[in-house]
Amino acid sequence: MSEAPKGLVDQHGGWDGVYKAVKAEELPWNAGAPDSDLVRLADAGALPLGRALDVGAGPGHDAAFLAARGWSVLAVDLSGEALKLAAKTVRAEGQQGRVTLREVDILKLKEPAESFALVHDRGCFHTLAEADRPRYVAQMTRILQPGGKVVLRTFSDHEPAGPGPHRFSKDELEALWAKLFHFEDFRTGIFEGPRKPKAYLSLLRKKG
Ligand SMILES: C[S@@+](CC[C@H](N)C(=O)[O-])C[C@H]1O[C@@H](n2cnc3c(N)ncnc32)[C@H](O)[C@@H]1O
């Protein structure tokens, strides 16, 4: 289902393999803290409160942050090993009661329609195979409430070509999302962590 970061995932035989082989603090996407744009948007009151879904939760810093700010969080990941890290982070932040961890492929998540006010995705969408991107957008459209939002962090086309996640252009993101979502915010930046690749941050609001 997921195709990247090709080097790392292929080298270790899948996401679980990466999480087993690489120390948490050396994972390229692990900033050891919540994403600063997520913090900015929450501080600005730009994100609807209620139930939140953290997609591809990984080490769990964003899920723990959302819980600490009042969301009831479902954090999902394909990798059980990732969820062990997330559990540790959530415990360390004292947010066990507000975060549910579930090992599942986001494309197969069976939550009822309109279950969430907010979806956060830092680095999962950009690892999906091209054919799965429209399926992902359809899943977000289904599980979000009207007016619900997606905070989406992806690699950008300012990052040089190479192995790893897909480098999205703004046009590509719009072609996938703009029919069913308004772009409320769009900015260039970096994917925080040890390597700091160029990234985009999209804040998407479901139409209707
Ligand atoms: C680049 S990491 C980012 C982790 C975390 N969001 C962060 O920023 O630290 C991508 C994560 O997405 C997970 N993942 C990849 N494909 C997935 C899918 N189809 N469904 C759920 N999780 C997935 C991987 O296991 C991995 O933990």
Image (cartoon, rainbow, N blue to C red):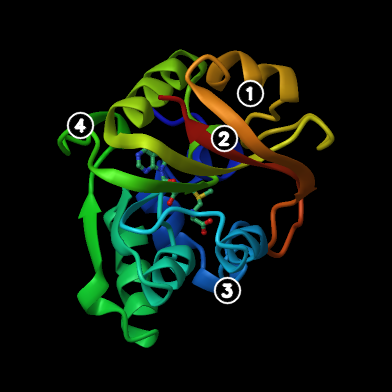
Question: Going 51% across and 17% down the picture, which residue do you hit?
Answer: 130
Kindly state the secondary structure of the residue where label 4 is placed: loop
| Mark 4 / mark 1, whichever is N-terminal | 4
Q: Answer yes or no: is residue 78 visible.
A: no
What is the C-alpha distance between the residues marked 4 and 1? 23 Å
How many residues crowd mark 1 within 10 Å: few (<14), some (14–19), many (20+)? some
Question: Going 38% across and 59% down the picture, which residue do you hit?
Answer: 49
Q: Is residue 126 left or right of residue 132?
A: right
Q: Is residue 159 left or right of residue 151?
A: right
Amino acid type, callout 2: Lys
Q: Is residue 197 left or right of residue 55?
A: right
How many residues crowd mark 3 within 10 Å: few (<14), some (14–19), many (20+)? some
Q: Which residue is mark 3?
A: 32
What is the C-alpha distance between the residues marked 2 and 3? 23 Å
Q: Is mark 4 within 8 Å of ligand 1?
A: no
What is the C-alpha distance between the residues marked 3 and 1? 27 Å
Amino acid type, callout 4: Ala
| Mark 2 / mark 1, whichever is N-terminal | 2
Question: Compared with residue 204, is residue 100 higher up or lower down, i.e. above or below?
Answer: below
Residue 113: which numbered mark, if any? 4
Kindly state the secondary structure of the residue where label 2 is placed: helix
Q: x%, y% of residue 172?
A: 67, 18
Question: Going 31% across and 57% down the picture, which residue do you hit?
Answer: 50
What is the C-alpha distance between the residues marked 2 and 1? 21 Å
Kindly state the secondary structure of the residue where label 3 is placed: loop
| Mark 3 / mark 1, whichever is N-terminal | 3
Nearer to us: label 3 or label 1: 1
